[in-house]
Image: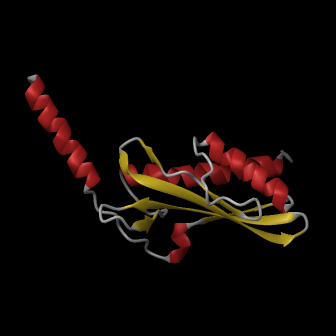
Amino acid sequence: MNQRTTCWLFAAIVAAAACARITPPPSPETTHVDVVVAASLAQAYGRTVDAFLAEGLAAGPGSQPNGTLVSQPTTFGNVGNPLTYRALLVVMDSQTTRIVLSGTIRNGLGSEDPLHSQMTGWLAGAWQHIQHIADGLRSTSKHGG
């Protein structure tokens, strides 16, 4: 295969990935992961920031220590469209916080579609970041970290 053919093939693959269809979630429950941690709001926020950082996600300007963490828009692997990850922290009592993790992908029309657990292909990898964040939060909760 010559260089010109390789370039055309690469361009076709990139175009196909950019136009990949984003399927809607089968139910609202598939668009988020809930984690309950034995921690105050401030402790849970710090742990959530750490879990985001462990996934290579930096906090964005919409983040507030009073209960909202929003990542900077980012891309991973074959996902060329910007992804944004969110955590909503809800105080259950003084030492228990519920963390609701979710994410969105900006589609080709400029609006955002929710990531969900039933995504396949390269979009499944985008959802896996939410699972990894949840696993990190569960791990620090068990170890008191």
Q: How is the image coloured?
A: secondary structure
User: Which quadrant of the view contains residue 41?
Assistant: bottom right
**Image: 50 above or below 117:** above
Q: Quick one: 45 or 134, which is closer to the camera?
A: 45
**Image: 121 above or below 103:** above
**Residue at position x 60%, y 60% in the image:** 86
Numbered disc total: 0
User: Which quadrant of the view contains residue 63?
Assistant: bottom right
Q: Quick one: 125 or 85, which is closer to the camera?
A: 85
Q: Is residue 34 left or right of residue 130?
A: right
**Residue at position x 18%, y 40% in the image:** 11
Q: Is residue 87 left or right of residue 94?
A: left
**Residue at position x 55%, y 73% in the image:** 29
* Residue lying at the far right of the rendered structure: 94
* Residue lying at the far bottom of the rendered structure: 27
**Residue at position x 90%, y 63% in the image:** 95
- Residue 2 position in % (x across, y down): 8, 23
- Residue 72 position in % (x across, y down): 54, 51
Q: Quadrant location of the N terminus?
A: top left
Q: Quadrant location of the C terminus?
A: top right
- Residue 131 position in % (x across, y down): 58, 53
- Residue 53 position in % (x across, y down): 64, 42
